[in-house]
Image (cartoon, rainbow, N blue to C red):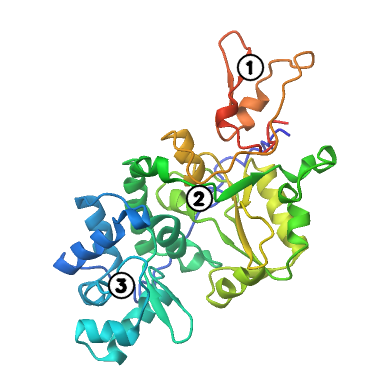
Amino acid sequence: MPRRTEKPPKDAPPKNRIELSKDLTGFDSARRITEAHRKIMAHYASPLLSGPAPSELFLDMVGHMFTEEEAAVAVHLPPLRPRTAGKVAKLSGRPINEVTRILDHLAFRKAVILAYGSPRKYTILPVVPGTFEMALITSDLSTRNEWHKTFAGYFERLWETGFIRDYKRYSKPLVRYVPVQSLGSSLQSAWPSDRLEEILDRYDDFAVGHCQCRMAMELSGKGCGKPLEACASFGPMARPVIERGLSRRVDKAEMLAIKRNAEENGCVTWLMNAAGDPKGDCSCSCCGCCCHALRSVTEFNVPGAIATPHFMPQKNEEKCKSCALCVKACPMGAWTAAPDRSVAFNPARCIGCGLCV
């Protein structure tokens, strides 16, 4: 299905212009880099978190994320070892009420660490997926400020180093792209894991926030203008992100409409590879220019966490007019047009989304 190409009025503002908030309360950065910042960078750089290698750029990003005081506390959160405030207080030699205040601020205001459970435990997450998404996703764009813009810029520069290539051999298929909803009538025998509406039937709670990848690119001045509100959670996974204000509650009908609108604007939807998990599911609607999952393939030739599709398009040679609409629609560069206008297909790049159809 060709994407819609409605032209905006002349001199119209960008479709996704983000008006940055002037409220920087609680979003301070370090004035100087300390040894604690270097140790935190080493935690994030761990292969256990698929982290980037230590670098001055990476260190500057960590300094942006944590003030000197925050770093002195967060340094006691090693990879994959969640700790209570009491444990961190003991290790840091600070009063527990002071440590709790700092950790809660990092978890619930800056959203650069994760807090969960009772008694509450705290942990750092991988830079991506994890910290990047948590720091930027929101239900309210008016809460984004210059701190978020700078954070997005650091991450984009870090991503462009291609560190994800170091983990090519360790990648597992965690997500699956599903065919666009407009193909429902032509997928009568589709697997249940490929039919979005059937998957959503299993859940009662739905939440949607703004896509962190497109938001980061908008904040970095490289946005594509496609719909921002598309990052979703279903079932038990929806409740905590609603409670924390990261997403807003919607019903199934609105969720399907949001996904359909994203698809009509050239985006494709993924779900966790174990679609329909009773513990919940999450999903975003991605574009080839901003989404880091898709860019890991198109920019670095790393399959990453994308599962092999269940369906592949087949060109009908008799009907093909070499119009190249399929080339324009494909977010992965799987379809290409030669100078003689012939159209070729590379199945290794296909994610089975069906936009070309």
Q: Which mark is residue 214?
A: 2
Question: Given this view, does label 1 or label 3 mark the residue nearer the observer?
Answer: 3
Judging depth in this view, the residue of 34 and 176 nearest the camera is: 176
Above or below residue 25? Residue 144 is: above
Going from N to C along the chain, the mark reached first, 3 or 2, is: 3
Q: Are marks 1 and 3 in contact (CB under 8 Å)?
A: no
Q: Which mark is residue 97?
A: none
Question: Given this view, does label 3 or label 2 mark the residue nearer the observer?
Answer: 3
Cα distance in 3D space between marks 3 and 2: 29 Å
Residue under pointer 3: 77
Based on the displayed image, in which of its 4 quarters is residue 320 positioned? Answer: top right
Q: Residue at x 36, y 57 (%)?
A: 49
Residue 139, position as x, y percentages in the image: 56, 67
Extreme residue in the top direction: 340
Q: Are marks 2 and 1 in contact (CB under 8 Å)?
A: no
Name the amino acid type tagged 2.
Answer: Arg
Residue under pointer 1: 343
Cα distance in 3D space between marks 2 and 1: 29 Å
Disc 1, SS = strand
Q: Residue at x 67, y 25 (%)?
A: 325
Name the amino acid type tagged 1.
Answer: Val
